Image (tube, rainbow, N blue to C red):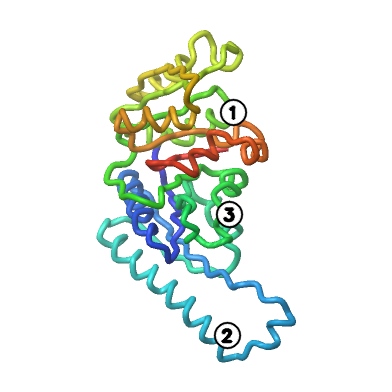
Amino acid sequence: MSLKDILVHMDSNKPCEARLDTALRLATDHQAHLVGLYIIKRPYIPPYVDAQISEEVWQAQAATLGQMADEAEAMFRPKAEKAGVSYEWRRVEGGKGEAIQVHARYSDLAVLGQRDSDGNSGADMEDMADRLVLTLGRPVLLVPYVGAYENLGQRVMIAWDGSRSATRAVHDALPILEKAKKVTVLAANPNSDPSRHGDIPGADISLHLARHGIKVEAQRLTANDISVGDLLLSRAADDGIDLLVMGAYGHSRWRELVLGGVTRHMMDHMTMPVLMSH
């Protein structure tokens, strides 16, 4: 198995270059076609204000937005050429979430950026990753807004809880897992329900992956004084993990938004790229 089509969301923010580099590594490793998608979102202007804005102002705004798109393209094309991958550039207008949905549904993986906690991502980007993970129907690779990631998919951790979404994430990640040097299946604070985990948490999914020729190791960790999200991040740091694979929103999204949860914690505090599926 391999990835054949990868979409990367491009924008004018500083973290975009690391996101593009990550997407290019995947495209190179899998000989995949890479689509760079840049979305120009026109601001909403109420009609009573629109009538008071001159044509010159609209033209100046259009020129600025166009220049930002051109700068992103000027970053994308030389890097894609240097990587030697098949690629294309798409520049569209519309809402970011809606446009990504339209284009990413025809790809094997969508590469997006983590929401910038400093607020530099724009108001319309605040919950874009949340919405896309839930509605896209394709796996989403979230790249942190800080740092560069020279390796991706060499040492992979699977956050395994036996849920439908975790199962979906594992199988969406198979093309990457099959190329990994080491895969760790981590059952963090697993419950004792045998209908979810079987007799030994993580054992059955590890055996399934081993039959795919994947080098896999099962681990079980229990800690009452730390959240599951922090437990995953701590173990990932200790083991030099360069990719985390997990299901998104095993509970209700609203429950996680209100009460907290692993998905929200990871979206806010990830320290390495995270592949999520729902």
- First of labels 1, 2 by sequence position: 2
- First of labels 1, 3 by sequence position: 3
| Three-letter residue code for mark 1 | Arg
Q: CA distance from mark 1 to mark 2?
A: 48 Å
Camera-side mark, 1 or 2: 2
Above-or-below relation of 213 to 97 = above
Q: Residues within 10 Å of mark 3 (few under 14, many from 20)?
A: some
Circle 2 is placed at which residue position? 58
Query: Which corner quadrant holds the C terminus?
Result: top right
Q: Nearer the viewer, residue 147 or 141?
A: 147
Circle 1 is placed at which residue position? 164
Q: Is the C-beta separation of discs 1 and 2 under 8 Å?
A: no
Q: Residue at x 51, y 38 (%)?
A: 265
**In the structure shown, which secondary structural element does the residue marked by tag 1 occupy?**
helix
Above-or-below relation of 33 to 172 = below
**In the structure shown, which secondary structural element does the residue marked by tag 3 occupy?**
helix
Q: Position of residue 50 (x, y in %)?
A: 68, 83
Camera-side mark, 3 or 2: 2
Circle 3 is placed at which residue position? 101
- First of labels 3, 2 by sequence position: 2
Q: Residue at x 37, y 24 (%)?
A: 184
